[in-house]
Amino acid sequence: MTINEKLSKIQTQFKSKKSRFNSFGKYYFRSAEDILEATKPFLLELGVTVVINEELILSAAVTPFIKTTATITDGKETINATAIVGVDVTQKGMQMPQRFGAASSYGKKYALGNLFLIDDTQDSDATNTHGKSQSKTMTSAQIESAKGYIKSGGKIESIKAKYQLTPSQEKELKTL
């Protein structure tokens, strides 16, 4: 079995409930730890390992970012997925380590979500606009991830609920 086939099996059979509750936002969510726990049964069965690496990206003119890479490997082949999260160094009510920790947690969650095609459109992170109108367009990397999502049985309507697709992006996704 190739690494693509092993990853596809995890992506299609992955189950992780949103068992954590945010009392401030009044929503349930899953954490990076929940995602990793749900992948453990697949590790021995498929002979794969999953690791997460982080890199701090600093620039004098820009907010610091954490680049998180989730990797699955079978010792011969490797597949990576990345997430980049900004660190809000001005966040009130948090100490600096908490600010970096929060960004790290988000980065891990979203890198794993990208790797395992976890659709979090019902997560408050995806649906909470904080009173602002939100309409995100998809990047080319997100289009590639969406293609995999659709090929594995996902619906374009779920993608359209989260992103504003250009006519060419929608056409590209509908032809799969």
Image: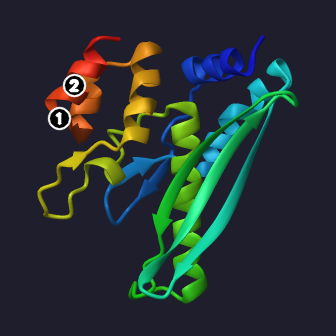
Seen at 21% across and 58% down, the residue is 129
Instruction: Please say whether residue 31 is visible from this viewpoint.
Output: no
Seen at 11% across and 56% down, the residue is 133
Q: Nearer the viewer, residue 107 or 73?
A: 73
Colouring rule applied to residues: rainbow
Q: Secondary structure at mark 2?
A: helix
In the picture, the quarter occupied by the N terminus is: top right
- Seen in the picture, residue 154 relative to 169 is either above or below; the reply is above
Q: Nearer the viewer, residue 135 or 94?
A: 135
In the picture, the quarter occupied by the C terminus is: top left
Dot 1 surroundings within 10 Å: few (below 14), some, or many (20 or more)?
few
Q: Secondary structure at mark 1?
A: loop
Tag 1: residue type? Answer: Thr
When asked about the image quadrant of residue 66, the answer is bottom right
- Seen in the picture, residue 156 relative to 25 is either above or below; the reply is above
Q: Tally the marks.
A: 2
Where residue 166 is drawn, which disc sits there?
1
Q: Position of residue 150 (x, y in %)?
A: 39, 18
Q: Nearer the viewer, residue 30 or 66?
A: 66
Q: Position of residue 93 (x, y in %)?
A: 42, 87
Dot 2 surroundings within 10 Å: few (below 14), some, or many (20 or more)?
some
Q: Are marks 2 and 1 in contact (CB under 8 Å)?
A: yes
When asked about the image quadrant of residue 154, the answer is top left
Question: Taking 77 as reference, is 20 left or right?
Answer: left
Where residue 170 is drawn, which disc sits there?
2
Seen at 61% across and 57% down, the residue is 68
Seen at 48% across and 41% down, the residue is 18
Tag 2: residue type? Answer: Glu
- Seen in the picture, residue 80 relative to 26 is either above or below; the reply is above
**What whole-number distance in Å separates the C-alpha atoms at marks 2 and 1?**
6 Å
